[in-house]
Amino acid sequence: MAKYLAQIIVMGVQVVGRAFARALRQEFAASRAAADARGRAGHRSAAASNLSGLSLQEAQQILNVSKLSPEEVQKNYEHLFKVNDKSVGGSFYLQSKVVRAKERLDEELKIQAQEDSEKRQKPHT
């Protein structure tokens, strides 16, 4: 009886160990893919994400912006800022999130403008 119990315990540990190892490999692969995606996005953009505490995607979701256009960002910012004003029953926390999202998107627009001007200044060879 004790022998069978020990075998069951050993088999259970093996199954859990394999599942853990598989989950760890998947997590490493996902982490590597995310790092590669951040690398393609550019070092300036990653630095802006670290400074602001918001990723570009998160800022776009907060302001409900699908593509980066200054007009759309400004329009959505003004609307969400007014809606979340404390004097009209809004949330100061949400209003601050809206402000941080706009700052992050403004920084990204600035980075894109710099990259575009650098591309135009480079001579074609």
Image: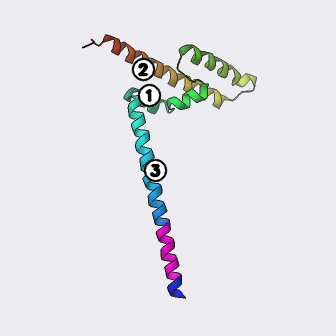
* Residue topped by disc 2: 111
Q: Is residue 11 above or below residue 39?
A: below
Crowding at label 2, few (<14), some or many (≥20) Cα neighbours within 10 Å? some
> Mark 1–mark 2 contact, CB under 8 Å?
yes
Magenta span of residues = 5-15
The picture places residue 32, in percent across and down from the top left corner, at: 40, 43
Q: Secondary structure at mark 2?
A: helix
Residue type, numbered disc 3: Glu
Circle nearer the viewer, 1 or 2: 2
On the rendered image, what quadrant is the C terminus found in?
top left
The residue most toward the front is: 125
The one nearer the camera, 73 or 67, is: 67
Residue type, numbered disc 2: Ile
Measured in 3D between alpha carbons, the distance from the residue under mark 3 to the one under mark 1, in whole angstroms, is 25 Å
> Mark 3–mark 1 contact, CB under 8 Å?
no
The picture places residue 109, in percent across and down from the top left corner, at: 47, 19
* Residue topped by disc 1: 48
84 to the left or right of 27: right
Crowding at label 3, few (<14), some or many (≥20) Cα neighbours within 10 Å? few
Circle nearer the viewer, 2 or 3: 3
The picture places residue 117, in percent across and down from the top left corner, at: 37, 13
Residue type, numbered disc 1: Ala
